[in-house]
Image (cartoon, helix red, strand yellow):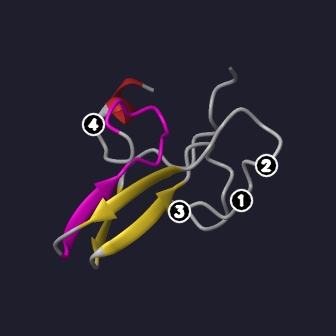
Amino acid sequence: MSEPKIAGAKPVVLDLKPGTYWWCACGRSQNQPFCDGSHQGNDFAPVQFKVDIAGRSALCMCKRTGDQPRCDGSHSKL
């Protein structure tokens, strides 16, 4: 499996409302950090996640997190 494209060197912190979201795992989406279908034809698939309570979330942009889609600090090792 190939490496995902790094979409950013730091997480993006967003205020998310309750709902279902699709996080871009390949790094190719033009709608980062969310999927826009750009993964078609590669080894990656978006990651579905749910937000139950509105609030801030730090979403991974380097695409190396071990806690998809949330940032786990992996960007500091790039």
State which tag comes first along the sequence, 3 or 4: 3
Q: Position of residue 2 (x, y in %)?
A: 69, 23
State which tag comes first along the sequence, 4 or 1: 1
Disc nearest the viewer among 4 and 2: 2
Q: Are marks 3 and 1 in contact (CB under 8 Å)?
A: no
| Distance Cα–Cα, label 2 vs label 3 | 14 Å
Amino acid carrying mark 3 in the image: Phe
| Distance Cα–Cα, label 4 vs label 2 | 26 Å
Q: Residues within 10 Å of mark 2 (few under 14, many from 20)?
A: few
| Distance Cα–Cα, label 3 vs label 1 | 9 Å
Q: Are marks 2 and 1 in contact (CB under 8 Å)?
A: yes
Amino acid carrying mark 1 in the image: Gly
| Distance Cα–Cα, label 4 vs label 1 | 24 Å
Q: Residues within 10 Å of mark 1 (few under 14, many from 20)?
A: some
Question: What residue is disc 3 on?
Answer: 34
Query: Is disc 2 placed on a helix, strand or loop?
Result: loop
At x 64%, y 26%, the residue is 3
Amino acid carrying mark 4 in the image: Asp
Disc nearest the viewer among 2 and 3: 2
Position of residue 23 in the picture relative to residue 14 (left or right):
right
Q: In the rendered structure, which segment of residues is drawn in magenta?
A: 54-67
Residue 21 vs 60, above or below: the answer is: below
Question: What residue is disc 2 on?
Answer: 40
Question: What residue is disc 1 on?
Answer: 37
Image mark for residue 72: 4
Position of residue 21 in the picture relative to residue 71 (left or right):
right
Query: Is disc 4 placed on a helix, strand or loop?
Result: loop
